[in-house]
């Protein structure tokens, strides 16, 4: 998939060329090479005491299944800022991050990329489902809907958390 048909610097039509070991769109006039960078997303395992915050996805993929607040990193923000922003947008809660939890590959063939998981806790706001979420809820470890989790990495992060209780 090529987001550019023309060079963003000189407007010359891009041509596919073998560069750096791969076929890549490139400009024959100024030398611009379009690298296909992976998507980067950030997510937070938000906890309060012995409860974890999960959201029910209101949009595909895996609509109706439970996950942690997450979203794609915008061009003008760091992954940590994305994690905090997405938690606020999806749950209404203001959070603070407590550190890095894990880094995993996103294996969705339509949007392969990197998912950065943080740990965090709420410092304000009011819990409410918003944005692309149909429900936001706190779960005790014994209440986690294991059969209704959206992604394998969600399961893995929750297993890491429950192992520390």
Image (tube, rainbow, N blue to C red):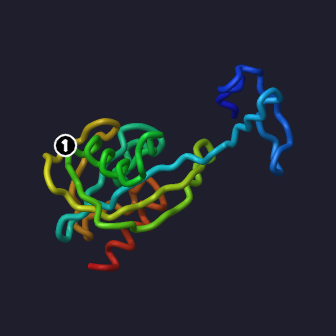
Q: Position of residue 133 (x, y in %)?
A: 31, 41
Q: Quadrant of residue 28?
A: top right
Kindly identify which residue carries mark 1: 128
Residue 135 visible from this viewpoint: no
Q: Position of residue 165 (x, y in %)?
A: 26, 79
The residue sitting at 33% across, 45% down in the picture is 86
- Comparing 137 with 130, the one in front is 130
Residue 14 visible from this viewpoint: yes
- Comparing 117 with 148, the one in front is 117
The residue sitting at 43% across, 40% down in the picture is 76
Q: Position of residue 39 (x, y in %)?
A: 55, 46
**Mark 1, residues whose alpha carbon is within 10 Å: few (<14), some, or many (≥20)?**
some
- Comparing 79 with 48, the one in front is 79
The residue sitting at 35% across, 49% down in the picture is 81
> Eyeballing the image, is 164 above or below 71?
below
Q: Position of residue 94 (x, y in %)?
A: 20, 50
> Eyeballing the image, is 27 above or below 97?
above
Residue lying furthest right: 18
Quadrant the N terminus occupies: top right
The residue sitting at 71% across, 20% down in the picture is 11
- Comparing 2 with 159, the one in front is 2
Q: Quick check: 163 left or right of 13? A: left
Q: Quick check: 28 left or right of 127? A: right
Judged from the image, the secondary structure of the residue bearing numbered disc 1 is: loop
> Eyeballing the image, is 20 above or below 24?
below
Q: Quadrant of residue 17?
A: top right
> Eyeballing the image, is 129 above or below 45?
above
């Amino acid at each position: 998939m090529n987001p550019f048909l023309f060079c963003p610097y000189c407007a010359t039509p891009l041509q596919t060329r073998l560069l750096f070991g791969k076929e890549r769109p490139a400009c024959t006039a100024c030398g611009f090479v379009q690298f296909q960078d992976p998507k980067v997303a950030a997510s937070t395992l938000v906890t309060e005491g012995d409860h974890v915050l999960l959201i029910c996805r209101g949009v595909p993929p895996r609509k109706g299944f439970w996950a942690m607040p997450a979203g794609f990193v915008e061009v003008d923000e760091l992954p940590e800022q994305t994690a905090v922003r997405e938690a606020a947008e999806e749950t209404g809660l203001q959070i603070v991050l407590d550190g890095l939890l894990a880094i995993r590959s996103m294996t969705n063939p339509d949007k392969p990329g990197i998912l950065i998981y943080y740990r965090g806790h709420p410092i304000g706001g009011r819990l409410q489902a918003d944005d692309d979420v149909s429900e936001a809820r706190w779960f005790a470890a014994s209440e986690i809907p294991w059969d209704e989790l959206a992604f394998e990495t969600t399961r893995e992060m929750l297993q890491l958390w429950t192992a520390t209780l």
